[in-house]
């Protein structure tokens, strides 16, 4: 075994430009950026909390945390993150621990990349 191949898993995330544009239209630039910053911070915290709950085997609380991620992600146009958080909830409902572990790993990847995508947009006028 001379060659080891490391596979990098990368998710394609795309922000909903219409949702972001609506935020900027409704709240103005300063208000929209404030909402985005607070939402990004809360999403980052919630992702870490959801992972901790998984490791502790606290699925009922994990389900609640995942559901809140769906709402927050939808609010700021992170559609991929909202979908995967919903998938995590479904895995909990199905009591499928193997699928839950895999889907949680995907949630963390999509979450990180979604947060990076919003961060990269800050300062750009939509």
Image (cartoon, rainbow, N blue to C red):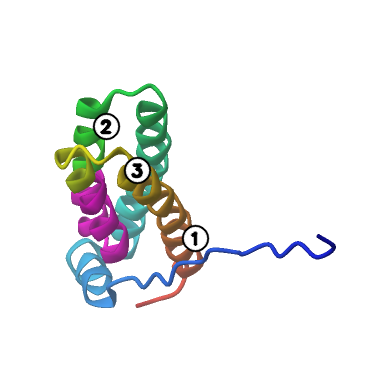
Q: Secondary structure at mark 1?
A: helix
Q: Is residue 2 magenta?
A: no
Residue lying furthest right:
2
Q: Position of residue 102 (x, y in %)?
A: 39, 49
Q: Is residue 75 above or below residue 92?
A: below
Q: Is residue 84 left or right of residue 104?
A: left
Instruction: Work out how far the residue at label 3 is from the one at label 2, CA to CA, in angstroms.
Output: 15 Å
Distance from Cα at disc 1 to Cα at disc 2? 24 Å
Select label 1 or label 3 by which is in front.
3
Tell which tag, 3 or 2, sits nearer the viewer: 3
Provide the residue designation for mark 1. 116
What residue appears at the point 39 percent right and 41 percent down from the top-left corner? 47
Q: Position of residue 25 (x, y in %)?
A: 21, 71
Residue 114 vertical placement versus 40 (above, below): below
Dot 1 or dot 2: first in sequence order is 2
Whether residue 90 is visible: yes
**Residue occupied by mark 3:** 98
Which residue corresponds to mark 2?
A: 62
1 vs 2, front mark: 2
């Amino acid at each position: 075994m001379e060659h080891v191949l490391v596979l990098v898993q990368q998710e394609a995330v795309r922000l909903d430009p219409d949702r972001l544009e609506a935020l900027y239209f409704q709240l103005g630039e300063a208000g929209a950026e404030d909402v985005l910053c607070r939402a990004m911070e809360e999403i980052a915290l919630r992702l870490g909390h959801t992972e901790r709950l998984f490791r502790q085997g606290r699925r009922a609380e994990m389900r609640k945390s995942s559901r809140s991620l769906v709402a927050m992600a939808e609010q700021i146009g992170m559609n991929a993150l909202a979908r995967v958080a919903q998938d995590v909830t479904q895995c909990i409902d199905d009591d499928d621990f193997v699928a839950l572990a895999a889907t949680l790993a995907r949630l963390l990847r999509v979450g990180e990349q979604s947060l990076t995508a919003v961060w990269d947009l800050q300062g750009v006028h939509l």
